[in-house]
Amino acid sequence: MTTMTCSSSSNKDPPIAKKEKYEMEMFGDLRVDNYYWLRDDSRSNAQMLSYLQDENAYTEFVMSGTKRLEDQIYAEIRGRIKEEDISAPVRRGPYYYYERTLEGKEYVQHCRRLVSNNEAPPSVFDVMPTGPDAPPEHVILDENLKASGHAYYSIGAFKVSPNNKLVAYAEDTKGDEIYSAYVIDAETKTPLEKPLAGVTSNLEWAGDGAWLYITMDATLRPDKVWLHYLGTEKSNDLCLYHEKDDMFSIELEASESKEFLFVASGSKVTRFVFFFDISKPEKGLMPLTPRLDGIDTSVSHRGNHFFILRRSDECFNSELLACPLDNISATTVLLPHRESVKIQDVQLFTDHLVVYEREMGLPRITVFDLPPVGEPLERFQGGRHVDFIDPVYSVDPSESQFSSSILRFSYRSLRTPWSVYDYDMNTGISVLKKIETVLGGFDALNYVTERQWATAPDGTQIPISVVYQKNLVKLDGSDPLLLYGYGSYEHCLDPSFKGSRLSLLDRGFIYAIAHIRGGGEMGRQWYENGKLSKKNNTFTDFIACAEYLIEKKYCTKEKLCIEGRSAGGLLIGAVLNMRPDLFKAAIAGVPFVDVLTTMLDPTIPLTTSEWEVKPQKYPAILVTAGLHDPRVMYSEPAKFVAKLRAMKTDDNLLLFKCEQGAGHFSKSGRFEKLQEDAFVFAFIMKTLDMVPTLSFREFNGEGGREWTMDFC
């Protein structure tokens, strides 16, 4: 047996970005940014594009030795997908609406078919008929056809008019989240008017002949809401509200009853709401909740009452109020504030109220009966909880029919694929309507999911969600582990299933999520204690989780990899600087890294905070970006990589991959996203020296020889 080993080392050196001194002075402080030249808002500068192309070429070169492994992983991931499938049909009036995926196609088709017996009341046992005797399927919109000729394609809204005759949709063909809105005839697919360009994806029907939409200012801040009547020119549209305070952004949503639209203006701590009566459009927007600093409100409607979810410094986990439509100042507390339970969302029905809550980091659904419309609303007592089976999981509301007693929600865990349930709020019967098909012999019982708790430096207990393949993992410290984190914007990073992750779990990896402060998993205070002057808790919490997993022999630091995206990329950058000795490899996806420069520049969308790159040893690092990203400008990770190359004192991998036809959420096609997962997994295994040895046998007559080749 002859052994031949290939190496990724070569004379090809990594790109070195030139240094051009650029001085910035503010508040008496002078800062020098040698890589400021990498920022080009037009994304057309030849030098900048050449540098990004050089980085991509270098990354491709370094990873060429693992291309076979990457292709193998991609084939595995794709092989688990049922490529031709439909989503759980949603009943809207006389139609079932659903999305269809086709074999080999990147995008979905938006479809519908008539309900066979539209007079029958909805039931959890309803099934959309298919087959030759069923009403025919009608494809309203095929994204595959619309995406033709575009490197990127995304539909951010698909809204059917109340009479089911028209569809309004918003499309983005660059990844910059600047949309064009179209209206088509649902049956003929014929466009009814010219598209409205330069809008957000946030639009809602105001009856069958008009809709509201939102536009943005130069920094991509949603600042104006407009009323548009079909068949009229955009120049004639009525601006209903202009938010001039650049700390606030506009949002738009429809009530479950479809009688009102709500326009909210919100900052990080304050949110107030207007209402738009669809039956009386001439009245325009009417104020509903006042603009009070530190008060955050959102609104729903049922019958003769508005329901108001209200958060304040005193009621930090929110309380639920109600007020009559004709006397909005006369509020009644329906659900009082509770320090241990956070009200995250509410969903209204004709006879029921559904509350999405969080307690001890876990989501739950509580159902309350409502008195008949017209009767007084009083404080709720009791309520029925929906039971779930996994120790850690995710639950989210789905579209339901307001007039029915059927609640639809989605459920998933680290070992349970995405599932859709219909729950009868009268009987408590729950029926599984759809579960994501995972091919290739997947058995959820082969995987263990559990919750652990790490202790932060200040004594706070930090939850960790863990999953692994029980037949492969030894739990003696020898297993590789990928730890994911976010910890920003009060976002709850609940455990969810991802089919591509099985390619790690089935190779003996442990996967863990650190639910660190700055997120919202443990209530509003969890967020407050991980931002502004307390932001450092986000980073030290993550480090504490890593140390706990090492202490409990889930892994060693030589087998510990970490990952975060966007604000989670900020997390990764910070912990790499604080504890570079603790990790073997790191993936920073579209990371927020150039904080001071960005936060002090009023022309740049969103905000970030800066890392001080130190001259020290770092683990292997993969950084990704999207050229058209409006949330984290490509130049932030580019500058970070350039500075790291100049200052790191080790020979570990530092790779940068910038997608030229993508935005913040990477490429748009479903298979393109799988390819990105395969690339990241190959990078992780390369850094851990886990690239498999491939054997080949060559025969010559009766004799033969065998050798192995190590791909590294």
Image (spheres, helix red, strand yellow):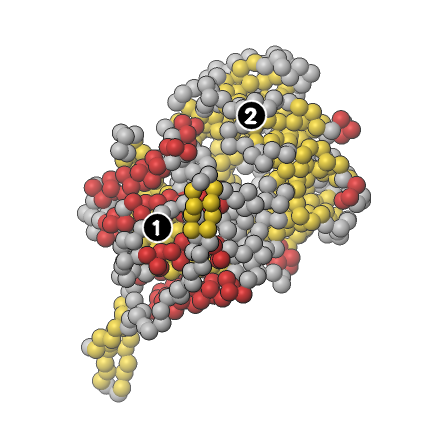
Q: Which one is in front, 599 or 289? A: 599
Residue drawn at point x = 36 percent, y = 72 percent: 12
Residue drawn at point x = 51 percent, y = 29 percent: 269
> Where's residue 424, x and y in %?
53, 29
Residue drawn at point x = 67 percent, y = 48 percent: 198
Is residue 604 at least partly visible in the picture? yes
Q: Which one is in front, 514 or 655? A: 655
Q: Residue furthest front?
A: 28
Amino acid identity at mark 1:
Val
Judged left or right of residue 502, residue 333 is right
Label 1 vs label 2: CA separation?
Answer: 40 Å
Look at the image and tell me in which quarter the C terminus lies.
Answer: bottom left
The image shows residue 698, relative to residue 560, as above or below, that is below
> Where's residue 420, x and y in %?
50, 40
For the residue labelled by badge 1, is the local secondary structure a helix, a strand or a loop?
Answer: loop
- Single out the mark in the foreground, 1 or 2: 1
For the residue labelled by badge 2, is the local secondary structure a helix, a strand or a loop?
Answer: strand
Q: How many marks?
A: 2
- Pointer 1 or 2: first along the chain: 2
Question: Label 2 belongs to which residue?
Answer: 297
Question: Label 1 belongs to which residue?
Answer: 613
Judged left or right of residue 547, residue 327 is right
Q: Residue furthest bottom?
A: 701
The image shows residue 50, relative to residue 137, as above or below, that is below
The image shows residue 478, relative to residue 539, as above or below, that is below
Q: Which one is in front, 8 or 613? A: 613
